[in-house]
Image: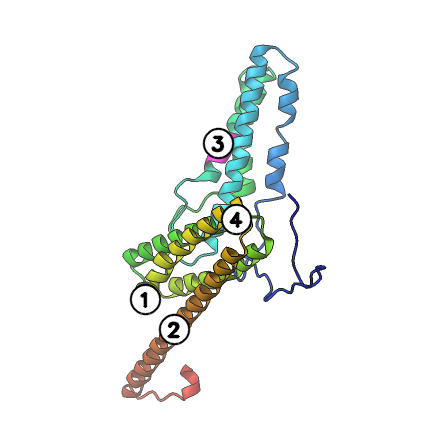
Amino acid sequence: MAQRFGGKYSPDGVKETAPNTGGFRGARRTRAGGRVNLLFFAPLPLALRAFGSGPVDMMFNLAALGTLLLAAWLTREGILAQEAYEARKIARRPAIPRKIFASVLTGVGLGIAGFAAGGGLLEPAIYTIAGAILHSLSFGLDPLQDKRLEGVDSFQTDRVARVVDQAEDYLKSMSDTIRRTGDRQLEARLDRFQVTVRDMLRTVEDDPRDLTAARKYLGVYLMGARDASVKYADLAARAPNAEAREKYLLLLSDLEQNFTAKTRALMADSTTDLDIEIEVLRERLEREGVHLETKDLA
């Protein structure tokens, strides 16, 4: 179905209320492209070779093709998981080491392909070892340790990581749901709301003490926003509903204002805590006979 693209240069003259900043500020281009995409195309000749040989060779070639395509998919998912891990200050290591599994499967797939081509067992063994090593050198290994803040105990770190993971799941679900409607302007509006939510997530990661104050926003409010997104998408799938769309936009605006205000309050509290720590440090230094100008600790 054709989709209308809005914007200030569109024929209907609709203007964007704000630039589309994407999913979060400071986003970088993903590395899950280029070389990774080549991994999906490189084994395709095995399909031609499979149907040009006998049943046994066909089985081995198709097995090699499936194994290499699975390895390519795991590589892409592993890179995406690592990028999400690197973008956060507090994060748990990926539950499944996708890139490590991909390296093993790449070696196995090349070994099967080598065995199907004939030549004994030595050549397939060499392909297996070389393929696994080269894949690991090209794409690296998965993060194997949780990322924690210095001076923050593991209990607090795990609490923040769980809440952030849950919040990111809610945001992803909302994006997937609204994408089904095919409404590009609504997708852009949702992206701007998600920027605001991720500002709060980064604030909580910077100071886990803010988690208690922000927990309702990152849990109850986001869960409600996700449920509202699902209900709106269901209505839009039946028939266009301008009234429901307007109500959904107002909901996003209200939530964005509340999240922004709460994030500013959290940052103000953090600034107050810093001022108190600086004042305490200044008093201690003065008792030790060290006198500092205000600008020295500002």
**Foreground: disc 3 or disc 1:** 1
Query: Where is 16 relative to 298, above or below?
Result: above
- Mark 4, Cα crowd under 10 Å, few <14 / some 14-19 / many 20+, is some
Asked if marks 3 and 1 touch (Cβ < 8 Å), the reply is: no
**Foreground: disc 4 or disc 1:** 4
- Write down the region rendered in magenta: 101-106
Image coordinates for residue 50, horizontal then vertical, percent: 62, 18
Measured in 3D between alpha carbons, the distance from the residue under mark 2 to the one under mark 1, in whole angstroms, is 10 Å
Seen from the viewer's position, the closer of residues 99 and 131 is 99
Secondary element at image label 4: helix
Q: Earlier in the sequence, mark 2 or mark 1?
A: 1
Image coordinates for residue 278, horizontal then vertical, percent: 35, 80
Name the residue type under label 2. Ala
Seen from the viewer's position, the closer of residues 54 and 6 is 6
**Foreground: disc 4 or disc 2:** 4
Q: Which residue is mark 1?
A: 213
